[in-house]
Image (cartoon, rainbow, N blue to C red):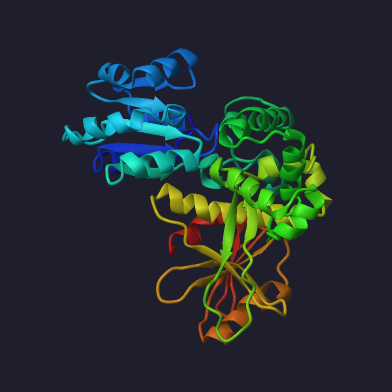
Amino acid sequence: MIKRNAELELRLLSTQFKAVAVVGPRQSGKTTLVRMVFTDKSYVSLENPDMRKYALEDPRGFLSNYPDGAILDEVQRAPELFSYLQQILDDSATKGMFILTGSNNFTLQESISQSLAGRVGFLFLLPLSLSEINDKNYDANHLMFKGGYPELYHSDTDPVRYYANYIRTYIERDVRLLKNITDLFAFERFLRLCAGRTGQMLNMSSLANEAGVDVKTISSWIGVLEASFIVFRLQPYHKNYNKRIVKMPKIYFYDTGLAAALLSIENAGQLAFHPFRGNLFENMIVLEFLKSRYNDGKSNNLFFWRDNVGHEIDLLLEAGISPLPVEIKSGATVSDEFFKGILFWNKMTGTDGGFVIYGGDAKQKRSNGITVVPYCELERIEKVM
């Protein structure tokens, strides 16, 4: 088993809350992690039809089998349990009694907010980070193509076949559970269109025109993708510094391997000259910062900034008094072009410093105060977050 960076936070939450909810994409390693950490707890998968039927028809009887608590996997499949869990947790002083996992963020959070608010600690577990993979045999193209799902690093599973099955299963099963979407072919076309917008502004009107549906439907479908940990939105930084700024969010995938598969990329070599290489590289780096935050139990503090004439900062980290600017460049050779965005930002805000993350392998400290960091050494920046 690959050691997960979130393990420490999971153990800490279990000493502070009566229940802990571990949520994240399907196959991101939630079950493996909680079963490894809580070896003394009974394990129940509510994906099992018989166990789910028991839990739905007799929730009180079902929970009575676990007086010392249990791991309830994919617990959102049996929402009736939450009201009964509330009474059990209120009557007990035991911390970390129940460990709940789920891959539907909206359903799980809604159920918890209605019945278990204040009793449950949350941990978001995303696919493997670069530091967890920690394999020098993989260059940037291979990392973007393969993505971070643990199964791909436990075996010789072919990424193309893995993601084809993941997409098919997600659309045929999870989408039906989340929303009554009847035209699954249209939804898959929409999903592939989203992959083609990775790292770009989320223009719902444009997306609606290409998908052949109305804007209201696109907004609903984006919500489905977010609730099931397929995509997330990076919000624009809210301070305008007397500039007209872009207020539209950007869209990224929770896994670059999935995005690459949706773009019909069949091997890492195709990425070398692919028109979306820069977008996927940016996605990978933004995602790394998000994983680092979540693994430490912190909230999302990531933004981007762009004004109406094209000045842009790829990533702003809210850390301390002023946000920390980060530029992301997929090229392996440092050029003056890499620094333009940060230098403009620093002049505008009266600050200094910042980071450029690029596709090369040499760290540089520039006289302009900007530090150039290879993509494989992101921990240098994550420590200041």
Q: Is residue 334 above or below residue 23?
A: below
User: In this rendering, would 32 be left or right of 265?
Assistant: left
- Total count of labels: 0
Q: Residue 36 at what x, y percent from top left?
A: 38, 27
User: In this rendering, would 85 be left or right of 103?
Assistant: left
Report the front residue among 186 and 305: 186
User: In this rendering, would 98 be left or right of 178?
Assistant: left
Report the front residue among 196 and 172: 172
Q: Is residue 10 above or below residue 207?
A: above
Report the front residue among 296 and 20: 20
Residue in view at x 72 percent, y 30 percent: 164
Q: Residue 206 at what x, y percent from top left?
A: 77, 58
Q: Is residue 384 above or below residue 270?
A: below
Q: Residue furthest top?
A: 50
Q: Is residue 64 above or below residue 32?
A: above
User: In this rendering, would 155 be left or right of 190?
Assistant: left
Residue in view at x 59 percent, y 76 percent: 366
Q: Is residue 35 visible?
A: no
Instruction: Determine which quarter of the picture holds residue 127.
Output: top right
Image quarter where the C terminus lies is bottom left
Report the front residue among 306 and 193: 193
Q: Residue 196 at what x, y percent from top left?
A: 76, 51
Q: Is residue 292 visible?
A: yes
Instruction: Determine which quarter of the picture holds residue 51.
Output: top left
Residue in view at x 65 percent, y 56 percent: 251
Q: Residue 104 at what x, y percent from top left?
A: 51, 37
